Image (spheres, rainbow, N blue to C red):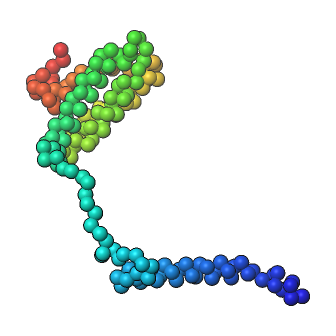
């Protein structure tokens, strides 16, 4: 009878409970030691940590940070390149060797990202950047290989190419060139 009662008792739960309690007590003791600045485990307190020598060397010939003006220049240069590239693809009907490509879709995604990111960098041209971002979204939908293969936008591609050129000229070229298409 005693063996039946003993076998029915969940001894492993008591043993686990005791080991968990011991672990929690140990953690509480360590936290207390750290707060007091002592260590019962022979370790060094955090305030007594030895100094670590830095192995990072700073080259005085390299500026620490890129200026806001340099970032804006980089963004605008990248945007100009993407607008130029997509203009070429659009003039070619979004086809390479007569086969539909996804170039306008991809350049459109990059143009949108650059335009949106640059809005806050150049508040004077924020409205234009926002307009370019909308144009880029249009390129992404009309520049998929499926859209190109359908032929649905073939008549629009030259007009979109002209718009790309106009945006580029508004941003970077002579304003009077932006309204003409040559």
Farthest residue in the right direction?
1
Count of all numbered marks drawn on residues in the image: 0
Depth check: 73 or 61 in front? 61
Task: Look at 31% across and 34% down and name the residue there.
Answer: 110
> Where 172 sits versus 57, above or below?
above
> Where 146 sits versus 33, above or below?
above
> Where 148 sits versus 124, above or below?
above
Depth check: 89 or 19 in front? 19
Q: Position of residue 96 (x, y in %)?
A: 38, 14
Q: Is residue 179 left or right of residue 139?
A: left
Farthest residue in the front direction?
42
Farthest residue in the top direction?
97
> Can residue 110 be seen from the camera position used here?
yes
Q: Quadrant of residue 108?
A: top left
Q: Position of residue 95 (x, y in %)?
A: 38, 16
> Can residue 122 be seen from the camera position used here?
no
Q: Is residue 7 left or right of residue 86?
A: right
Task: Look at 19% across and 36% down and name the residue there.
Answer: 74
Task: Look at 16% across and 37% down and name the residue there.
Answer: 73
Q: Quadrant of residue 111?
A: top left
Quadrant where the image shows the N terminus: bottom right
Task: Look at 21% across and 46% down and name the residue there.
Answer: 120
Q: Quadrant of residue 125?
A: top left
Q: Is residue 131 left or right of residue 108?
A: left
Q: Position of residue 168 (x, y in %)?
A: 19, 27
> Where 73 sits versus 142, above or below?
below
Q: Position of residue 71 (x, y in %)?
A: 18, 41
Quadrant where the image shows the C terminus: top left
């Amino acid at each position: 009878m005693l063996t039946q009662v003993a076998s029915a008792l969940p001894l492993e739960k008591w043993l686990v409970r005791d080991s968990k309690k011991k672990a929690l007590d140990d953690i509480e003791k360590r936290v207390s030691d750290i707060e007091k600045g002592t260590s019962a485990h022979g370790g060094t307190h955090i305030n007594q940590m030895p100094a670590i020598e830095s192995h990072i060397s700073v080259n005085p010939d390299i500026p620490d940070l890129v200026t806001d003006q340099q970032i804006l220049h980089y963004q605008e240069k990248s945007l100009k390149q993407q607008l130029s590239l997509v203009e070429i693809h659009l003039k070619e009907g979004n086809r390479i060797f007569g086969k539909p490509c996804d170039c306008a879709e991809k350049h459109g995604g990059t143009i949108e990202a650059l335009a949106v990111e640059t809005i806050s960098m150049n508040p004077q041209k924020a409205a234009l950047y926002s307009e370019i971002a909308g144009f880029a979204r249009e390129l992404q939908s009309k520049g998929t290989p499926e859209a190109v293969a359908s032929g649905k936008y073939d008549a629009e591609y030259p007009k979109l190419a002209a718009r790309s050129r106009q945006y580029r000229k508004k941003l970077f070229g002579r304003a009077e060139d932006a309204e003409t298409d040559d």
